[in-house]
Amino acid sequence: MPQLQHNMWVVAARTAALSIITGGGKWVEIVAHADPLYQHLIVTAERKFWRCVENGEQPTLFGAEPPKPRIEAVRVVDMSSSNAWAEFAGVFTRTRSAYLEHEQAKVELKSLMPEDAKEATGHGIRAKRSKSGAVSFDLLGQVEGSHAAVQ
């Protein structure tokens, strides 16, 4: 958005379009309308930054502290004395195979969903396809005794 607003300000345009090709190969166009207040704030920040470049000053983020650099991870730590670590390690170990089975089931369900389907339901779940093509799943509730043969 800042880049679109800046470009609209430079050429005095009222709208701009962002053209995106998603990972799934789908083309998406997002139209943005000019926001004079936002543009003013962007240009003010750009001018302030350029003054810092010219004067050699350290830029500040509108009075905010700059983010602290991440500390490089260099240690190897033994967590065997931590009760919390033990508890969550147990959960992780116990649920790992169920998680892998769950992820594989999602892959298989997605492959069974027709390409032109926006939504698919059955046996207590609903699969929804977003505009970008991503498929998400919801539980609809327990449906007992309604199993179909696997094809």
Image (tube, rainbow, N blue to C red):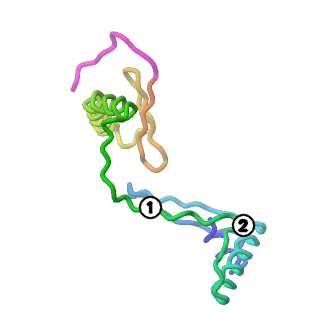
**In the rendered image, the vertical position of residue 79 relative to residue 70, given as above or below:** above
Toward which corner of the image does residue 91 lie, by quadrant? top left
Residue carrying label 1:
71
Image spot of residue 26 (x, y percent): 43, 56
Q: Earlier in the sequence, mark 2 or mark 1?
A: 2
Image spot of residue 117 (x, y percent): 41, 38
Residue carrying label 2:
63
Give the quarter of the figure containing the C terminus.
top left
* Label at residue 98: none
Q: Which residues are magenta?
A: 140-151
Camera-side mark, 2 or 1: 1
**In the visual, does 136 lie left or right of 92?**
right
Kindly give the residue lying farthest to the front in the view shown.
81
**In the visual, does 64 lie left or right of 105?**
right
In terms of depth relative to the viewer, which is nearer, 57 or 15?
57
Mark 1, secondary structure of its residue:
loop
Residue that appears at 37% across and 35% down = 82
**In the visual, does 85 lie left or right of 1?**
left
The answer to if 94 sits in the magenta stretch is no
Give the quarter of the figure containing the N terminus.
bottom right
The amino acid beneath tag 1 is: Ile
Image spot of residue 37 (x, y percent): 78, 67
Image spot of residue 141 (x, y percent): 45, 18
Mark 2, secondary structure of its residue:
loop
The amino acid beneath tag 2 is: Gly
**In the rendered image, the vertical position of residue 136 relative to residue 131, given as above or below:** above
The answer to if 149 sits in the magenta stretch is yes
Residue that appears at 47% across and 44% down = 130
